[in-house]
C-alpha cells in the first residue's frame, strides 16, 4: 500500500521508467511462453526447445539489469531525513524498492499472459482472437504451473537483485569518520575484465570450431550447438562490464594530460568521479553492440540459403528488448550521474563559472568515450566474428 501511495505522487519520468520495466517484463514473459508452447508442440525435439530457452536468457538478463537500474535511481527509495523516525530506515527502503520492482514486473508478466492467451484463442471477445493459434499450439493444453513459473522469473529475479543491491551495508570497524574515495583512484576490475573478455572470445572460438552446420543458429533453426558460443558471449559481456569503469576512468585521466585547460580538467574530473556509476552500463552497451555487429556479419556472409530471412519475429522481439533495455539502462545511469553532481554544478555557477564550460565539458566527455569505446566495440566484434567466417 505504501508503494502504491508513493507511486501516485511520483514524477512522470519515474512512472515512465516503471512502465518501461513492465513492458520489458511483458516482452520477456511472452518469449518464455512461446518457448513453452514450442516444447509442447514438439515433444521429440528437445534440442530446439533448449535452444529457444537459451536465447531467452539474454533478454531476461537485460530486463533484470534495467529493472535494477530503475530501482537504484528511484527517489522514493533514497534515505532522507525524517523517514527513519517513522520506521522507514535504509532496510525498509530497500524492501520498498524490491516491492515496487516486483509490482512493475508482475504487471508486465500479467499483460504477457493475457496477450498470449488472447492470441491462442483461450480468451475471446477481442479482435484477433486466436490469430496465432497454430503457432502457439492452441490444440495442446497449457500447463498452468509451468506457465506461471516462467512468468515469475522476471519479478523474482528483479526484486531479489534490487533488495540485494540496495540493502544497507555495515561500516567496518575503524572506518569512521568515513572519507570519500579519492577520484584519482582507479576502479578495480580492469585486469579481471580484460581476462574475462579474452576467455569469452577464446571459448566462443573453440565452441564455434567444432559445431556442425550453422555455428550459431537462431530460434527456429535446428542446426549447430550454440551453448558454448552463448557462454563465450556471456563471459565477454561480463568482462566488458567489469572493465567499463576502469576504461571510463582512464578516459578521464587522458583528458587531463598535457597541461589541460579548465574545460578539459572539468571533463576529466567528472569522468573519473562517475566512472563507477556509468562504466558498467557503458561496458554492457559495448558488449551488446559488438554482439549485434557480429550476428549481422555472420548471417550476411553466410551466402544464399533457402530461408533468406534468418531473423524471425520472436528473434526480432528479443533483440529489440536487449537493445532497448541496455540503452535505457545507460540513459538512467547518466541521469543518475547528472543528479549526483547537481550540487557541485550549482556551486560552480554561483562562483561565476560560465555555462558554456559545462556544455563544452559534456561534449568533450561524450567525444572521449566514443573515441575509446567505438574502436573497442569494433575490435571485439571483429574477433568474435572471425571464427564464423572460416
Image: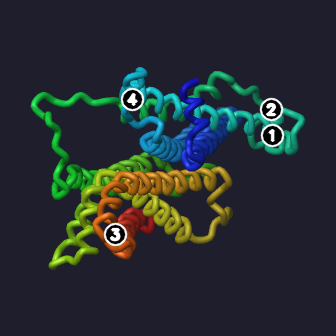
Residue nearest the viewer, comparing 238 with 125: 125
Residue contact between numbered discs 2 and 1, judged by CB atoms under 8 Å: yes
Disc 1 or disc 3, which is closer to the eye? Answer: 3
Q: Residue furthest left?
A: 174
Secondary structure found at label 2: loop
C-alpha distance separating marks 2 and 1: 8 Å
Where 269 sits versus 17, above or below?
below
**Residue 383: image tag:** none
**Residue linked to disc 2:** 139
- Neighbourhood count class around disc 4 (C-alpha, 10 Å): few under 14, some 14–19, many 20 upward: few
Q: Nearer the viewer, mark 4 or mark 2?
A: 4
Give the mark nearer the N terminus: 2 vs 1.
1
- In percent of the image, x 59 and y 44: which residue is there? 15
Where is residue 209 drawn, in percent x and y?
39, 57
Give the image quarter of residue 6. top right
State the CA–CA distance, disc 1 to disc 3.
51 Å
**Residue 27, picture quadrant:** top right
Question: How busy is the neighbourhood of tag 2: few (under 14 within 10 Å), some, or many (20 plus)?
Answer: few
Query: Which badge, 4 or 2, comes first in the chain's sequence?
Result: 4
Q: Write the residue at 19% across / 46% down.
A: 180
Mark 1–mark 4 CB contact (< 8 Å)? no
Q: Which image quarter holds the N terminus?
A: top right
User: Is there CB contact under 8 Å for labels 3 and 2?
Assistant: no
Please name the residue that numbered disc 4 is placed on: 82
Mark 1–mark 4 distance (CA, rounded to whole Å): 55 Å
> x, y (%) of residue 107?
64, 34
Residue 365 is marked as 3
Determine whether 27 is above or below 254 in the image.
above
For the residues carrying marks 3 and 2, which lies nearer the camera in this image?
A: 3
Amino acid at each position: 500500500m505504501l508503494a502504491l501511495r508513493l507511486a501516485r505522487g511520483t514524477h512522470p519520468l519515474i512512472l515512465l521508467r516503471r512502465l518501461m520495466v513492465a513492458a520489458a517484463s511483458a516482452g520477456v514473459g511472452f518469449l518464455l511462453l512461446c518457448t513453452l508452447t514450442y516444447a509442447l508442440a514438439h515433444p521429440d525435439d528437445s534440442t530446439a526447445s533448449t535452444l529457444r530457452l537459451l536465447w531467452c536468457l539474454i533478454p531476461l538478463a537485460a530486463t533484470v539489469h534495467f529493472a535494477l537500474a530503475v530501482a537504484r535511481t528511484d527517489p522514493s527509495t533514497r534515505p532522507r531525513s525524517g523517514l527513519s523516525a517513522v520506521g522507514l530506515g535504509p532496510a525498509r527502503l530497500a524492501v520498498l524498492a524490491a516491492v515496487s520492482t516486483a509490482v512493475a514486473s508482475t504487471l508486465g508478466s500479467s499483460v504477457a499472459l493475457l496477450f498470449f492467451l488472447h492470441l491462442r484463442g483461450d480468451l475471446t471477445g477481442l479482435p484477433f482472437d486466436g490469430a496465432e493459434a497454430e503457432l502457439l499450439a492452441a490444440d495442446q493444453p497449457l500447463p498452468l504451473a509451468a506457465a506461471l513459473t516462467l512468468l515469475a522469473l522476471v519479478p523474482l529475479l528483479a526484486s531479489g537483485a534490487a533488495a540485494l543491491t540496495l540493502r544497507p551495508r555495515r561500516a567496518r570497524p575503524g572506518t569512521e569518520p568515513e572519507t570519500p574515495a579519492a577520484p584519482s583512484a582507479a576502479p578495480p576490475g580492469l585486469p579481471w575484465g580484460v581476462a574475462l573478455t579474452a576467455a569469452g572470445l577464446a571459448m566462443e572460438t573453440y565452441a564455434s570450431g567444432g559445431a556442425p552446420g550453422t555455428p550459431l543458429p537462431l530460434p527456429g533453426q535446428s542446426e549447430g550447438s550454440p551453448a558454448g558460443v552463448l557462454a563465450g558471449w556471456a563471459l565477454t559481456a561480463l568482462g566488458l562490464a567489469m572493465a567499463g569503469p576502469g576504461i571510463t576512468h582512464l578516459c578521464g585521466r587522458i583528458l587531463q594530460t598535457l597541461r589541460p585547460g579548465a574545460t578539459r580538467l572539468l571533463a576529466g574530473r567528472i569522468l573519473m568521479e562517475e566512472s563507477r556509476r556509468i562504466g558498467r552500463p557503458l561496458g554492457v552497451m559495448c558488449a551488446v553492440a559488438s554482439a549485434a555487429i557480429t550476428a549481422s556479419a555472420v548471417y550476411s556472409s553466410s551466402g544464399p540459403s533457402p530461408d533468406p530471412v534468418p531473423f524471425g519475429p520472436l528473434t526480432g522481439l528479443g533483440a529489440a528488448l536487449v537493445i532497448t533495455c541496455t540503452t535505457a539502462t545507460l540513459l538512467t545511469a547518466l541521469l543518475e550521474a547528472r543528479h549526483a553532481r547537481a550540487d557541485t554544478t550549482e556551486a560552480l555557477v554561483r562562483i561565476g563559472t560560465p555555462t558554456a564550460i559545462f556544455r563544452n565539458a559534456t561534449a568533450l566527455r561524450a567525444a572521449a568515450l566514443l573515441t575509446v569505446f567505438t574502436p573497442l566495440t569494433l575490435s571485439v566484434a571483429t574477433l568474435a566474428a572471425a571464427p564464423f567466417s572460416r
